[in-house]
Image: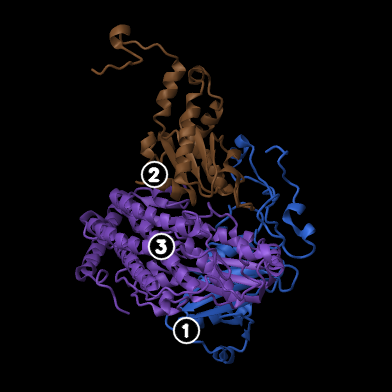
Chain colours: A brown, B blue, C purple
Amino acid sequence: MLNQTVAYDSKVEGEVIVTKADAVINWIRKNSVWPMPMGLACCAIELMAAGASRFDISRFGMEVMRFSPRQADCMIVAGTVTYKMAEVIRRIYEQMGDPKWVVAMGACASTGGMYRSYATLQGVDRVVPVDVYISGCPPRPEALLDAMIKLQEKIMDENSAKNLIKVPVNKDIRKDALST
Amino acid sequence: MSDIDKSRFLSQFDYLTERESSDHVALNCPAGKLIEFCTSLRDEFGFDLLLDVTAIDWDVATPRFTGVYHFYSTASSNYLRVAADCPDNVNPVLPSLTSIYSAADWHERETYDLMGIRYEGHPNLKRILMWDSYPYHPLRKDFPLAGIETPLPAEDVAERTNLKVVAAPMMGGPFHSSGDGKMSQTEPSAKDESWNEQSSK
Amino acid sequence: MAQTKEISLGDTGARAAKAHSNAQAKVVAADETVSEVNSETMALNVGPSHPTTHGVLRLMMELDGDLIKKCEPVLGYLHRGDEKIAENMTYNQFVPYTDRLDYLAPLANNVAYAMAVEKLANLEVPERCQAIRMISCELARISSHLLGVGVYGMDAGAWTVFMYTFTEREKLYTLFEELTGARFTTSYTRIGGVARDIPDGWLGRVNSFCKGVIDVLDQVDKMLTRNRIFMDRTVGIGVITKEQALSYGMTGPNLRASGVDLDLRKDNPYMMYDQCDFEVPIGLNGDCYDRYLMRAEEIKQSVSIIRQVIGKFPEGSYYAEDAKKIFAPQKSKVLSSMEELIQNFMLVTEGPQMPQGEVYFEAENPKGSLGFFIVSKGGGVPYRMKIRGPSFCNLSILSELIPGHFLTDITVILGSLDFVMGECDR
């Protein structure tokens, strides 16, 4: 064995680690983000590029793209959100299990971008709560990767343990969603 | 590209008139004769592709709406533009070409959706791009680019999220003035005061 | 027109006929069993957020077991109001919006739009500009078809193809970035020219890309063309007859796969396509397999066009120098000369000045004919602009094409039609 200092030595402390629950839960959540690609328009192509060989999102532990909201916990809204689509996005968001995060990818999803018209929702944050906004039209795949790392940092700061026993804020919303 | 002989059309169909055009041969056809003319276009003149159906809103002029059709002949590689004025300015109606070209189906639905022209004889004339309950026809000239406030189609989502279809902000937008009048008055940002950085979402 | 070897492979026709009759027999058999059981039909909704729909298309279907009885496409989930926006801005300001129509081939859209407006202005651009535009168009076609083939393979269950083609696309993006400054929202053309000249050594890099893409195409060919699973899933599926395709106004590779010889680059040559020697592949059966072969072959033809254009790349200016009221003057001149400063000011505030008139221009885009119908009352802003998105017309056949197929076939059919919702909904 190399002469190196490790933070934890099972021979000394036994098979017990003492740490904050938040730190453990967040660490687990941070490294197992399953994104749901909500590919709506042009940004979806850059989202695909981020998953393909050159940029390779799997280097950061979040390559498990799931097209079913039930299996995902981070929705990447990539593209222009129209009013017709807003309803769908909200419904899909409600189907995702807690905890869940939303990334608004690109100018259109963040603010409506260059589409200031009668049909376009001016920012997806009007229907779902957004955690990370990415600028660019479309953002480069590097920007998406950066945003995902920012999201991981954000997850590390959450009060997860406290929220575990707290009644979810949107409880009745979820009931509504299930009953329909 | 070989030019088609428009005099052949004009002599064979006396109801046609020549239309001003910067490129292809263009003809005006009365709305009532459209089906008859287009049938012979396809069967006798070989215009087998209906490329595009659209309409123009001339705003205050009469007739207000003009339906425009573009045809293409795969045999002679020619384009043809046919325009038909809608006789009624308030309830514009044109005959549907769906019985001649299947392509007309979606194009006419789109024109109905965005321009509000009713196509008589269309088997399924309902909105295609906007949602079914949308009350306006956005491409008409009296409809503002920013849109008009309307309720969201899904009531339950609207209730939970407090979301309405609202006019889009025009401040600092990429738009150019529409050209009529002084720049300071026609700039979209000067007209639109529905939104600014201070107002709540 | 010569049919290419790849398309007219002797046995595919027979195979297709056989597979088709088998499929029909299956359908009939399924029909009989169903009527015996007297089961109820089931409504199934696919999309608007679904991996097979390549965007935000929604299909509402009526199923009888696994057999689709009725299919109604619902669109408009990406309707952003492009046509209304176009009426509110100058001609040059609209160029970025054309990027986002068919966002798999933005350069081709830029060129089509610029040419439509130039047709209105009756303006001829110099040869060098045309050559640059032709190379960009064909690169855009390659990029679109690479994605089309890759994603199509993925739809049919072959994930690897996607990785190969996407790697090539990344190389293309590097080329686009050098040329235009952006990976795919290029906004490269201006009315009367292009934004800037080609960078040093760029043509050489395009050449070496062309060599690489042919190699990859060979690999894709090995992976898909004779792949038993791929053939079983595509041959004889989604057959569109010549008459159907014409009646529904289909254009581009989808129409040619059905055996109609229509390619605007040959039939109504624009730019310098009439000086290039290339073949237009024509399909025999109009099934999903033919549509795949069509795209693969078109990539090869595009490579050949690019090589020919590079071979005699013209010298000269990359914009129309005499079009003073249309193309913005050089920045260095704007800063040093009063006349150019005024010219630049007028262009920015009023837009490029166009005569009155109506024009319709179509270009052969990767997805089909992208048409712009522009009504001008003079001045710098169009009075009305209609965009004919080829995907819109290509999709309108769905409600007739899909019924009679099994649920699993829609993945392949949608993949083979290779549509983009951006230009479909606009």
Counting from the top left corner in percent of width and height, residue C226 is at: 21, 60
**Quadrant in the picture for residue C348:** bottom right
User: Label 2 belongs to which residue?
Assistant: A55
Q: Chain of mark 1?
A: B
Q: Chain of mark 2?
A: A
Alpha carbon separation for disc pair 3 and 2: 26 Å
**Quadrant in the picture for residue C91:** bottom right
- Nearer to us of marks 1 and 3 is 3
Counting from the top left corner in percent of width and height, residue A9 is at: 31, 12
Disc 2 crowd rating (10 Å Cα; few below 14, some 14-19, many 20+) is: some
Disc 3 crowd rating (10 Å Cα; few below 14, some 14-19, many 20+) is: few
Which amino acid is tagged 2?
A: Phe
Residues at badges 1 and 3 in contact (C-beta under 8 Å)? no
Which amino acid is tagged 3?
A: Gly
Residue closer to the observer: B118 or C6? C6
Q: Chain of mark 3?
A: C
- The image shows residue B101, relative to residue C185, as above or below, that is below
Query: Looking at the rendered structure, which numbered label has been put on residue B1?
Result: 1
- The image shows residue B3, relative to residue B34, as above or below, that is below
Determine the residue positioned at 79% across, 57% down. Answer: B184
- Nearer to us of marks 3 and 2 is 3
Disc 1 crowd rating (10 Å Cα; few below 14, some 14-19, many 20+) is: few
Query: Do tags 3 and 2 sit on the same chain?
Result: no
Residue closer to the observer: A167 or C306? C306
* Horizontal arrangement in the rendering, residue C9 relative to residue C302 (left or right): left
Residues at badges 3 and 2 in contact (C-beta under 8 Å)? no
Query: Looking at the rendered structure, which numbered label has been put on residue C201?
Result: 3
The secondary element bearing badge 1 is classed as loop
